[in-house]
């Protein structure tokens, strides 16, 4: 029995696996390349889902983790002091931009957002949350409730009362075709309208991704969160920035995605890349909000010594090698190369730094084309390049390589991607 058959026989049917009957088993990696069980090597433009932020087989990270395991104690309990954890919290608090910040570690982005929502609803004594359509925040009841993406919302039984703001989709919906200034005005009007009509006036928080990850790297203009914040402040509503995909320099111009918006959130959630493959997430935020949990809250594994050792090594690597600068430079090359392409099926190339989305449509329309998207996705793999998929309609390819991507690798991937798009475009004209 193949591994795929065994997977299908033992896992629930709703677990997503890329490449269907041709599912990929990655058995090793080095730099920005991974090798599958059949011995084929791929250039990785997705890093899991922006998970392997530094790349594969990085000595500094492996050594830090090995050193911790070498002590004979992988972990006991967060009831004891953990030096690695305190050091990492100090670094993150300092980098957060939040004065007198506190940090709580979790094992995932979902738990980080769940914790942030718990704190915000407690401090505000309200279960009302504002979320953005096309968002993804996790797979627990509360985080699913604020996930504005039907494919990922497997329950409508919510502990929160949620109201929705429009996402900054420039192709369709109420923001279609708007320039930046008009989009900012429309977004603020939308927020005021929601507050005036459908909430009871005591909203706890707005949760927002600075760039919508699963939603296909949709992002508003600079200043959008700041514009929201002005209105939120009139009502004492908190701002939670979900930086699970956008943190640590990913967006190039900024260390955190929120910094493009002239605003400092009350709470920031993080996960994914900070562990470079090890399970690590958390919340950093204002002490007053972080302390609002009314009873003891505890995580057995959150910020355990192995994950925290990885986190410290990752963060030091990001800062020592100016990976934010690399994301800006190499991301700029990729964005420039992709924006120069002109094909009927490619409606929009968007993104920031090394977080780039390609939106595919039926030529001459804004009608999403998930089939052509899948075709490009598969052709990329055939050509030796791994990319991601996403978007509300499954019609966006997502590029989120390790932040260590070199210029040569960017050009190599660009050539494979361009070839795949050209082929799919030609096929769509014949069909
Ligand atoms: N927030 C965002 C923005 C995410 O992209 C994800 C994961 N795709 C999560 C939260 C949830 O993180 P996790 O899968 O680690 O629970």
Image (cartoon, helix red, strand yellow):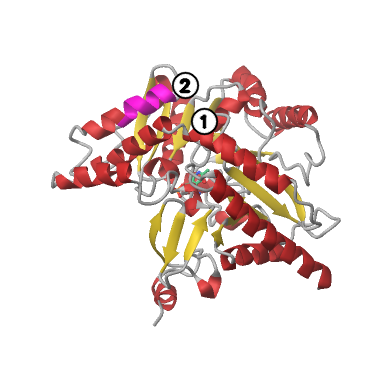
Determine if residue 251 is in view: no
Question: Along the line of sight, which residue is nearer the eye, 143 or 311?
Answer: 311
Q: Residue furthest left?
A: 72
In the rendered structure, the answer to whether residue 278 lies left or right of residue 190 reads left
Q: Residue furthest bottom?
A: 1
Q: Where does the C terminus fall, quadrant-wise?
A: bottom right
In the rendered structure, the answer to whether residue 84 lies left or right of residue 419 reads left
Determine if residue 48 is in view: yes
Question: Along the line of sight, which residue is nearer the eye, 328 or 75?
Answer: 328
Q: Which element is circle 2 on? A: loop
Q: Residue at x 50, y 61 (%)?
A: 42
Q: Name the image quarter holding residue 193.
A: top right
Q: What percent of the width, then of the height, locates residue 178?
A: 81, 36
Question: Along the line of sight, which residue is nearer the eye, 43 or 1?
Answer: 43
Chain-order first, disc 2 or disc 1: 2
Q: Is residue 188 magenta?
A: no
Q: Which residues are magenta?
A: 88-95
Question: Along the line of sight, which residue is nearer the eye, 117 or 334?
Answer: 334
Q: Is residue 93 magenta?
A: yes
> Residue 97's mark?
2
Q: Name the image quarter holding residue 88.
A: top left
> Residue 406's mark?
none
Q: Which element is circle 1 on? A: loop
In the rendered structure, the answer to whether residue 210 lies left or right of residue 3 reads right
Q: Residue at x 44, y 45 (%)?
A: 272
Q: What percent of the width, then of the height, locates residue 207?
A: 55, 35
> Residue 256's mark?
1
Give the distance between the C-alpha atoms of the residues marked 2 and 1, in whole angstroms.
9 Å
Above or below residue 422? Residue 276 is above
């Amino acid at each position: 029995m193949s591994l795929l058959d065994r997977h299908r026989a033992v896992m629930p049917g709703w677990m997503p696996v890329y490449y269907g009957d041709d599912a990929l088993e990655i058995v090793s990696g080095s730099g920005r390349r991974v090798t599958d069980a059949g011995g084929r090597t791929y250039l990785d433009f997705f890093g899991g889902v922006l998970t392997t932020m530094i790349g594969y087989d990085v000595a500094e990270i492996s050594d830090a983790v090995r050193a911790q395991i070498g002590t004979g104690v992988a972990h006991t309990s967060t009831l004891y002091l953990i030096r690695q954890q305190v050091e990492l919290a100090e670094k993150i608090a300092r980098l957060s931009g939040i004065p007198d910040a506190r940090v709580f570690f979790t094992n995932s982005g979902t738990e980080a957002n769940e914790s942030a929502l718990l704190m915000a609803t407690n401090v505000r004594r309200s279960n009302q949350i504002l979320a953005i359509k096309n968002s993804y925040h996790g797979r627990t009841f509360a985080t699913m409730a604020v996930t504005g993406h039907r494919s990922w919302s497997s329950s409508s039984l919510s502990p929160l009362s949620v109201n929705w703001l429009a996402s900054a989709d420039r192709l369709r919906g109420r923001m279609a075709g708007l320039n930046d200034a008009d989009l900012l005005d429309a977004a603020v009007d939308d927020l005021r309208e929601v507050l005036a009509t459908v909430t009871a006036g005591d909203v706890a928080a707005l949760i927002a991704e600075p760039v919508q990850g699963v939603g296909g790297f949709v992002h508003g203009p600079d200043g959008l969160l700041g514009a929201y914040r002005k209105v939120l402040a009139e009502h004492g509503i908190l701002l939670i920035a979900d930086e699970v995909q956008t943190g640590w320099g990913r967006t190039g111009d900024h260390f955190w995605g929120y910094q493009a918006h002239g605003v400092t959130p009350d709470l920031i959630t993080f996960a994914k890349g900070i562990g470079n493959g090890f399970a690590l997430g958390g919340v950093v935020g204002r002490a007053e909000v972080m302390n609002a949990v009314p009873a003891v809250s505890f995580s057995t594994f959150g910020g355990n010594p192995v994950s925290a050792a990885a986190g410290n090594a990752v963060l030091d690597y990001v800062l020592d090698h100016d990976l934010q600068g690399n994301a800006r430079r190499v991301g700029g090359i990729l964005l420039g190369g992709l924006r120069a392409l002109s094909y009927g099926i490619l409606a929009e190339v968007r993104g920031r730094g090394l977080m780039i989305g390609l939106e595919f449509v039926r030529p001459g329309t804004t009608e999403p084309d998930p089939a052509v998207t899948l075709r490009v996705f598969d052709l990329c793999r055939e050509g030796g390049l791994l990319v991601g998929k996403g978007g509300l309609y499954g019609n966006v390819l997502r590029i989120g390589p390790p932040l260590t991507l070199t210029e040569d690798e960017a050009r190599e991937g660009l050539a494979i991607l361009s070839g795949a798009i050209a082929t799919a475009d030609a096929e769509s004209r014949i069909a």
